[in-house]
């Protein structure tokens, strides 16, 4: 990001003067898209604006999860994430504003949660949170309104993510209307959709369990 400042000095005979010419070369900016653990994410799309004009990215920069802009002039810029990587969401605080001085030093216009400058000052870092989903479960009894008084006080249900137990089990009972909703669940893992299922941990004596529904409509 930071470019060398060239200084040409011309020395003239005694009694005259020294003339300095300082030339600031155009600078470059690299934007890095990462998850909350700092891993680079592919698939994001950004728009960089200066004075209502779009700045074109360097299409030859082939590092996955990075976007590079060359030959930038000093001034104020606006960066907007227009498309998030698969399984992630665009931060609510987007777009972001920042400035570049003549030497390529970055200064953010505000303190942002999802945008920061790397410690070495070479990158703008944009953090994305994963997209989340909600999954619900409801226990339905087909026993003619508990005709034989066989219902238990509660039923323990475990949530599974790709057939692996996820989180702690919950208890369905009359107090919660035999239902529960899991919220803020990651939608994807390693760029693949996670399949969630709710299952009873133990069979209920005198009843035959059957799972109906799906992840979108509830079980």
Image: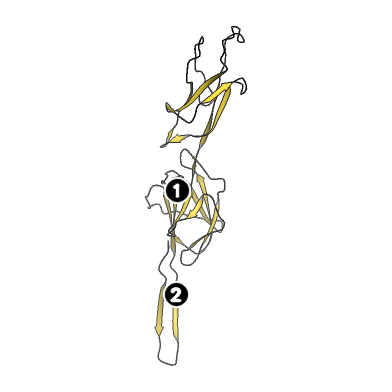
Q: Position of residue 85 (x, y in %)?
A: 46, 42
Question: Outermost residue toward the top?
Answer: 148
Disc nearer the start of the sequence (1/2): 2
Residues tagged 1 and 2 counted as in contact (Cβ below 8 A): no
* Foreground pick, 23 / 37: 37
Q: Position of residue 154 (x, y in %)?
A: 56, 19
The disc placed on residue 33 is: 1
Q: Regarding mark 1 in the picture, which secondary structure is present there? A: strand
Residue positioned 51% across, 47% down in the render: 81
Vertical comparison of 108 with 151: above or below? below
Q: Residues within 10 Å of mark 1 (few under 14, many from 20)?
A: many
Q: Regarding mark 2 in the picture, which secondary structure is present there? A: strand
Marks 1 and 2, Cα distance to the nearest angstrom? 35 Å
Q: Residues within 10 Å of mark 2 (few under 14, many from 20)?
A: few
Quadrant of the image containing the N terminus: bottom left
Instruction: Name the residue beneath numbered marker 2.
Output: 22
Count of all numbered marks drawn on residues in the image: 2
Residue positioned 56% across, 22% down in the render: 172
Q: Position of residue 152 (x, y in %)?
A: 56, 15
Residue positioned 41% across, 50% down in the render: 66
Depth check, mark 1 against mark 2: the one in front is: 1
* Foreground pick, 166 / 38: 166
Q: Position of residue 216 (x, y in %)?
A: 53, 26
Vertical comparison of 99 with 114: above or below? below
């Amino acid at each position: 990001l930071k470019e060398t400042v060239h200084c040409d000095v011309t020395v003239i005979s005694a009694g005259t003067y020294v003339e300095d010419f300082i030339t600031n070369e155009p600078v470059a900016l690299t934007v890095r898209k990462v998850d909350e653990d700092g891993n680079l994410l592919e698939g994001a799309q950004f728009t960089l604006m200066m004075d209502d004009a779009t700045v074109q990215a360097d299409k030859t920069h082939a590092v996955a999860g990075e976007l590079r802009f060359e030959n930038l002039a000093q001034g104020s810029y606006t960066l907007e994430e227009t498309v998030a990587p698969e399984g992630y969401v665009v931060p609510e605080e987007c777009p972001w504003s920042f400035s570049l001085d003549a030497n390529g030093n970055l200064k953010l216009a505000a303190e942002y949660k999802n945008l920061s400058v790397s410690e070495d000052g070479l990158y703008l870092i944009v953090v994305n949170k994963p997209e989340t989903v909600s999954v619900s479960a409801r226990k339905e009894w087909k026993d003619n309104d508990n005709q034989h008084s066989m219902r238990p006080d509660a039923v323990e249900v475990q949530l599974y993510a790709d057939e692996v137990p996820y989180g702690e089990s919950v208890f369905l009972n009359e107090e919660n209307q035999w239902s529960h909703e899991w919220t803020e669940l990651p939608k994807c893992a390693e760029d693949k959709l996670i399949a969630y299922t709710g299952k009873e941990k133990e069979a209920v004596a005198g009843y035959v369990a059957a799972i109906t529904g799906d992840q979108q409509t509830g079980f």
